[in-house]
């Protein structure tokens, strides 16, 4: 059971007490890990509130169901809990998650590892992707997965997934498109985004497609290490055929060349000043 008073005091404390943000990605929030105190072994993620109380209650319920669904499909995850915290008269969604060692984040491991090491990391992440999709049929609802390189840690050779927000379960495509704007930390995105709602809504489509999540992982690796792109393409093609045969044709079509991000999304990222650091 979370100590709401201690958590509230921590969130309202100064930066020195809270600790510096541990991610520069910052689309939804800037996660931090306290330097001391009862939450020093946790990562804290504080999100924007909403005026709609029912929508917030639904968010918490869906988040709990999404984490449970990920675990049920076999996705390794650190202990993750969400709560609505009363701060300044508003209810604010806060996620408290067991911290993973900083040196296990997949993205920097991919950047500094040997080619053979990075292929082992890709295999570990791919195994989680295949595990999820091969077991997701049991849920009779819309459910997705966002297994990007920045959302994995590699712990003892195993990929651990830690991104549970927004909860990709139950929400319709249009509802999720609106959430991408409502919970964006960037005011510019909330102001400009509604005029580009159709394109913003499309950001999520990869997360609900088994072949596209694999293609997205391979694309990220190719962009991180363009000199090794062919090795990642070869790995991805082989993995699709052996571990995700149901979706192999679509996945192979997406890996005929190094996959690229949609132009509108790279444009949003530049405008918002987002960096490709671990989204922990």
Image (cartoon, helix red, strand yellow):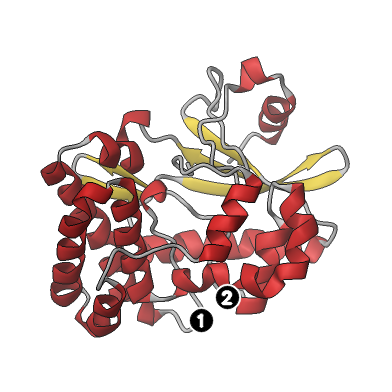
Comparing 20 with 198, the one in front is 198
Q: Is residue 261 visible?
A: yes
Left or right of 19, for residue 243: left
Work out whether 270 lies above or below 17.
below
User: Which quarter of the picture shows residue 36?
Assistant: top right
What is the x, y in percent for residue 234? 15, 64
Residue at position x 66%, y 32% in the image:
7
Confirm or deny contact between disc 1 and disc 2 (CB under 8 A).
yes
Q: Is residue 28 visible?
A: no
Comparing 156 with 182, the one in front is 182
In this rendering, the count of numbered labels is 2
What is the x, y in percent for residue 77? 38, 50
Residue at position x 71%, y 19% in the image:
14
Residue ID for mark 2: 170
Left or right of 275, for residue 219: left
Secondary structure under the numbered disc 1 in the rendered image? loop
Residue at position x 19%, y 45% in the image:
118
Residue ID for mark 1: 141
Query: Which mark is first along the chain, 2 or 1?
Result: 1
What is the x, y in percent for residue 100? 38, 35
Work out whether 117 lies above or below 189.
above
Residue at position x 52%, y 42% in the image:
275
Secondary structure under the numbered disc 2 in the rendered image? loop
Packing grade of label 2 (10 A; few <14, some 14-19, many >=20) is some
Comparing 91 with 275, the one in front is 275
CA distance for labels 1 and 2: 6 Å
Left or right of 119, for residue 58: right
What is the x, y in percent for residue 183? 69, 55
């Amino acid at each position: 059971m979370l100590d709401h008073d201690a958590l509230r005091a921590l969130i309202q404390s100064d930066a020195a007490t809270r600790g510096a943000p541990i991610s520069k990605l910052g689309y939804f929030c800037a996660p931090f890990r306290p330097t001391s105190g009862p939450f020093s072994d946790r990562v804290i993620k504080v999100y924007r509130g909403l005026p709609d109380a029912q929508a917030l209650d639904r968010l918490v319920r869906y988040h709990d169901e999404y984490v449970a669904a990920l675990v049920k499909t076999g996705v390794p995850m650190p202990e993750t809990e969400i709560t609505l915290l009363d701060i300044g008269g508003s209810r604010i969604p806060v996620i408290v998650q067991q911290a993973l060692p900083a040196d296990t984040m997949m993205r920097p491991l991919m950047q500094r590892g040997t080619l053979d090491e990075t292929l082992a990391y890709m295999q570990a992440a791919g195994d989680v992707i295949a595990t999820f999709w091969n077991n997701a049929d049991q849920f009779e609802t819309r459910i997705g997965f966002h297994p990007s390189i920045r959302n994995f840690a590699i712990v003892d050779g195993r990929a651990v997934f830690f991104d549970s927000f927004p909860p990709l379960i139950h929400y319709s495509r249009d509802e999720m498109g609106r959430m991408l704007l409502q919970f964006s930390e960037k005011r510019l995105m909330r102001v400009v985004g509604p005029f580009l709602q159709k394109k913003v809504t499309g950001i999520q489509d990869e997360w609900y497609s088994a072949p596209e999540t694999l293609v997205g992982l391979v694309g990220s690796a190719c962009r991180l290490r363009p000199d090794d792109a062919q090795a990642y393409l070869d790995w991805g093609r082989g993995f699709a055929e052996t571990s995700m045969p149901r979706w192999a044709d679509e996945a192979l079509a997406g890996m005929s060349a190094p996959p690229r991000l949609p132009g509108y999304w790279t444009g949003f990222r530049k405008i918002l000043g987002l960096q490709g650091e671990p989204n922990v």
